């Protein structure tokens, strides 16, 4: 991998194949056709417009990229206009497209890409910056993010639990590293896990089977609005179980974690996907070290039970010290 990108310990899935990751980038500024042209510039392939607001690029390198207006109403009107050919529908669609360039983000959704091929997205990010893409920090109204969907290394309950625990212990540190935009902190989309769920699954005696792990998650988190959203993975494992609790059509089954916390800072020339990726790798590494994970979980539980307010004794500083010197 590029020197910018850290390499996690567990590069292969349970089938012995390199793990892959899908990336979703929300932004504003360029027109949708400019985003399509940018993808094709670096990943040649066949372009199809499923509506004026949804484009697919079937690339030879990795498969299907999607570029779309991130607004379900626009998608519905666009398809209606294309299907009916009605002039009023077409004019309404064009009017909404103009509005979307001001307040509605566009989204690039990559196909699953091998971990070691992530640097191939860097030229796309650079070009988007050059053509005026704007991200989270450009306006208080731009709660835009970058979502990472890393393939799970295996489907074992212990593995999935270790990732949940590692993320909980590192959440505050990641927020500090990201300097997460205020508009995103105030939005419901990237909520951290509630304290009662942390207390439930971080204790040493919690060793659930897969069904119990999913049941407990759904009991404490009946929502997709979590910084680390496990619903796509659990829907992949047992869709009927998840749909009984969460009805949202936005939950799509896939064998990945859905990591939603990172900001999109694409108007910053020094920013790259590597920043968010490397923060995720810290989660990967802690999850892959059982002894260290147990030690950090115990320290985190002790910290949360302390009478000293977090603002005076920040957990993220303790995590920073540990990451700089794992022997602590």
Image: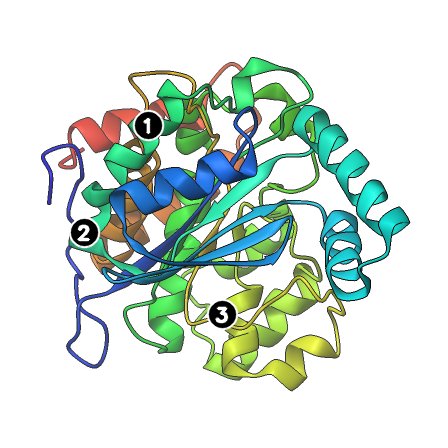
Q: Nearer the viewer, mark 1 or mark 2?
A: 1
Report the disc number at residue 211.
none
Q: Position of residue 239 (x, y in %)?
A: 61, 81
Q: Residue 113: image x %, image y %?
A: 28, 58
Per the image, label 2 sits on a secondary structure element best described as: helix
Side of 171 relative to 156 (left or right): right
Q: Which residue is mark 1?
A: 127
Q: Is residue 310 visible?
A: no
Tell me what residue is drawn at x 20 percent, y 81 percent. Answer: 15
Element on which disc 1 rests: helix
Closer mark to the observer between disc 1 and disc 3:
1
Is disc 2 surrounded by few (<14), some (14 to 19) or many (20+) residues within 10 Å?
few
Q: Is residue 92 above or below residue 160?
A: above
Judging from the image, what secondary structure is the residue with disc 3 in? helix
Residue 18: x and y in percent read 17, 67
- Residue at the disc numbered 3: 233
Q: Quadrant of the C terminus?
A: top left
Q: What residue is drawn where x is 69% and y is 67%?
A: 219
Of the image marks 3 and 2, the number of the one nearer the N terminus: 2
According to the image, label 2 marks what residue?
117
Q: CA distance from mark 1 to mark 2?
A: 18 Å
Pick the residue in front: 133 or 272: 133
**In front: mark 3 or mark 2?**
2
> Do the residues under discs 1 and 3 have CB atoms within 8 angstroms?
no
* Label 1 Cα crowd, 10 Å radius (few <14 / some 14-19 / many 20+): some
Image quarter for residue 154? bottom left
213 sits to left or right of 319:
right
Q: Residue 324: image x %, image y %?
A: 18, 27
């Amino acid at each position: 991998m590029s020197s910018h990108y850290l390499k996690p310990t567990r590069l292969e899935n349970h089938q012995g194949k390199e793990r892959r990751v899908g990336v979703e980038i929300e932004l504003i500024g360029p027109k949708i056709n400019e985003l399509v042209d940018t993808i094709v510039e670096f990943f040649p392939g066949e372009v199809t417009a499923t509506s004026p607001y949804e484009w697919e690029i079937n690339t030879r390198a990795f498969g299907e990229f999607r570029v779309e207006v991130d607004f379900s109403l626009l998608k519905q009107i666009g398809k209606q206009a294309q299907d009916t050919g009605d002039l009023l529908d077409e004019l309404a669609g064009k009017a909404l497209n103009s509005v979307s360039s001001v307040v509605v983000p566009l989204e690039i959704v990559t196909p699953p890409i091998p971990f070691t091929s992530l640097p191939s997205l860097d030229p796309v990010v650079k070009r988007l910056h050059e053509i005026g893409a704007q991200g989270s920090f450009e306006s208080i109204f731009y709660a835009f993010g970058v979502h990472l969907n890393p393939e799970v290394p295996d489907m074992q309950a212990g593995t999935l639990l270790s990732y949940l625990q590692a993320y909980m212990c590192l959440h505050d540190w990641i927020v500090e590293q990201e300097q997460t935009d205020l508009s995103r902190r105030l939005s419901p989309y990237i909520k951290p896990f509630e304290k009662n769920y942390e207390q439930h699954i971080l204790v040493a005696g919690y060793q659930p089977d897969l069904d119990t792990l999913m049941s407990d998650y759904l009991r404490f988190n009946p929502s997709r609005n979590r910084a680390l959203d496990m619903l796509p993975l659990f829907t992949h494992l047992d869709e009927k179980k998840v749909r009984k609790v969460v009805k949202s059509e936005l939950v799509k089954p896939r064998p990945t974690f859905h990591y939603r916390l990172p900001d999109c800072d694409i108007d910053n020339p020094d920013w790259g996907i590597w920043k968010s990726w490397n923060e995720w790798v810290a989660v990967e590494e802690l999850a892959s070290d059982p002894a260290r994970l147990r030690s950090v979980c115990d320290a985190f539980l002790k910290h949360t039970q302390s009478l000293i307010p977090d603002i005076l004794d920040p957990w993220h500083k303790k995590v920073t010290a540990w990451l700089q010197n794992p022997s602590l």
